[in-house]
Image (cartoon, grey):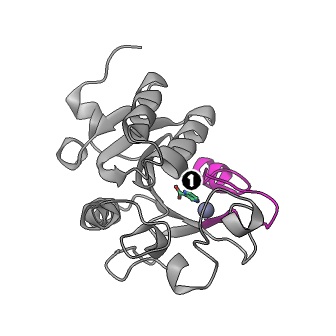
Amino acid sequence: MRSSSASDLKVKIGDALIVVDVQNDFLPGGSLAVPGGDEIVPVINRYTSLFESKGLPIFATRDWHPENHCSFDKQGGLWPVHCVKDTAGSRFPEELHLPASAVLISKATEEESDAYSGFQGTDLGERLKAVGVRRVLVGGLATDYCVLNTVKDAVEYGFDVLLLEDAIRAVEVKPGDGQKAIKEMIDMGVVPVSYDQVA
Ligand code: VGL
Ligand code: ZN
């Protein structure tokens, strides 16, 4: 494949924005706070405005767990209780601007299974294809978990992927996990971009 020119990066028909898990529990003060997670909210807002102004589709995923989800440490899982459906922690922050037309994708809704990817156990892939999407722009939280796995599945589904490098933050259970995840995505053919390159 030839390398893409700068003009190829501009958002266009066939693009969709995927906002991954920008939820209170993943922001500072939340139960599974991602360092600097709040810093991406105004940046995500620039992307949602851009897509809205161009009439392009926006999908917002959310971690939407039952109270006794298997990923919680009290159930033997890896994480503190977070993003329990219909609680303050699972809500989107007030500051996040999602147009009414944004499609909400709830994931990891079953007690017995976890899902880091917005495609896993949801109809996200079918919905993107149904509206003619060929390329997805992905930002949100966290780089090393749900962003990484959503991007992997997007590639698997055959979508071109632009990673919104100015609109992601990593949990970094191990220092370096964020950079490692970004490298893994780039090695899959994903192109890291920032706002001015696509607007
Ligand atoms: C996530 C850990 C547990 C994420 C979700 O959205 O990246 N991380 N559940
Ligand atoms: Zn979770």
**On screen, 49 above or below 138?**
below
Q: Which residue is mark 1?
A: 131
The kind of secondary structure element at disc 1 is: loop
The residue depicted at 49 percent of the width and 63 percent of the height is 21
Q: Which residues are magenta?
A: 105-131
Spot occupied by residue 138 in the image (x, y as percentages of width and height) = 42, 49
| Residue 101 seen in the figure | no
Residue for point 40% across, 75% down: 99
When the figure is inspected, residue 184 is found, relative to residue 89, above or below; the finding is: above
Tell me the quadrant of the picture where the N terminus can be found.
top left
The main secondary structure of the magenta stretch is loop
* Residue closer to the observer: 190 or 110: 110
Q: Which amino acid type corresponds to the residue marked 1 in the rendered image?
A: Val
> Does the magenta portion include 63?
no
Count of marks overlaid on the render: 1
Q: Is residue 135 left or right of residue 109?
A: left
